[in-house]
Image (cartoon, helix red, strand yellow):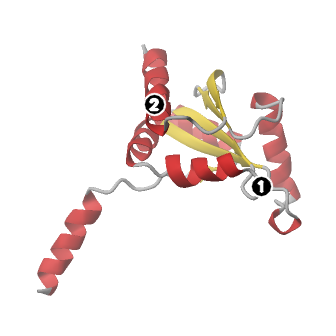
Amino acid sequence: MKLLLALLFFISTSFVATEPEWKHNLTDALQVAKKEHKFILVNFSGSDWCGPCIRLHKEVFVMENFIKVANDKLVLLNADFPRYKKNQLPPAQQKINDDIAERYNNKGVFPLTVLVDEKGNQIKSWEGFPSSPTEFIADIQQTIQDHQN
């Protein structure tokens, strides 16, 4: 019986896509993207005040089809800008996030998701929470495909 349960657990976990890791430093993300020939998906969020940002992370970035695209084609980078004192980032991380925002989000849009190539060039951006998460993910895939050819 234990063997059967262990086998069922192994089979069920083998088909579940593992949630990708979010980087918090553009330099690190660029290094991985260059090494693995991937694109970078930068997400600007306000994790403790921006409702659409929170929904994007809880509803879209955990979808199986997003995780598959992310694992295959993307390096994920989160630049978070919390407002509450208890959630403030260390000054060094805040500086890193400010630098990322200066480069890709100088208008301060939240949420903003930006697709970047392995050289750091912005390819496309999406503002706000997508009206259709499935179409948003498909658009990311199509944009990647268009830039690989």
The tag earlier along the polypeptide, 2 or 1, is 1
Query: Residue 68: percent from the left, percent from the top?
Result: 38, 43
* Image quarter of the C terminus: top left
- The residue shown at (61%, 39%) is 129
Q: Residue furthest top?
A: 149
- The residue shown at (80%, 55%) is 82
Q: Residue furthest front?
A: 131
- Could you tell me which secondary element the residue under label 1 belongs to? loop
Q: Residues within 10 Å of mark 1 (few under 14, many from 20)?
A: few
* Horizontal relation, residue 25 to residue 103: left or right: left
- The residue shown at (61%, 28%) is 116
Q: Nearer the viewer, residue 36 or 84?
A: 84
Spatial CA span between label 2 and label 1:
26 Å
Amino acid type of the residue that numbered disc 1 sits on in the rendered structure: Trp
Residue picked out by circle 1: 49
- Could you tell me which secondary element the residue under label 2 belongs to? helix
Quarter of image, res 16: bottom left
Query: Residue 92: percent from the left, percent from the top?
Result: 84, 54
* Residue 60, label in figure: none
* Image quarter of the N terminus: bottom left
- The residue shown at (70%, 40%) is 111
Q: Are marks 2 and 1 in contact (CB under 8 Å)?
A: no
Residue picked out by circle 2: 135
Quarter of image, res 89: bottom right
Amino acid type of the residue that numbered disc 2 sits on in the rendered structure: Glu
* Horizontal relation, residue 71 to residue 95: left or right: left
Q: How many marks?
A: 2
Q: Residues within 10 Å of mark 2 (few under 14, many from 20)?
A: few
Q: Residue furthest bottom?
A: 1
Q: Is residue 131 above or below residue 59?
A: above
Query: Residue 79: percent from the left, percent from the top?
Result: 72, 46
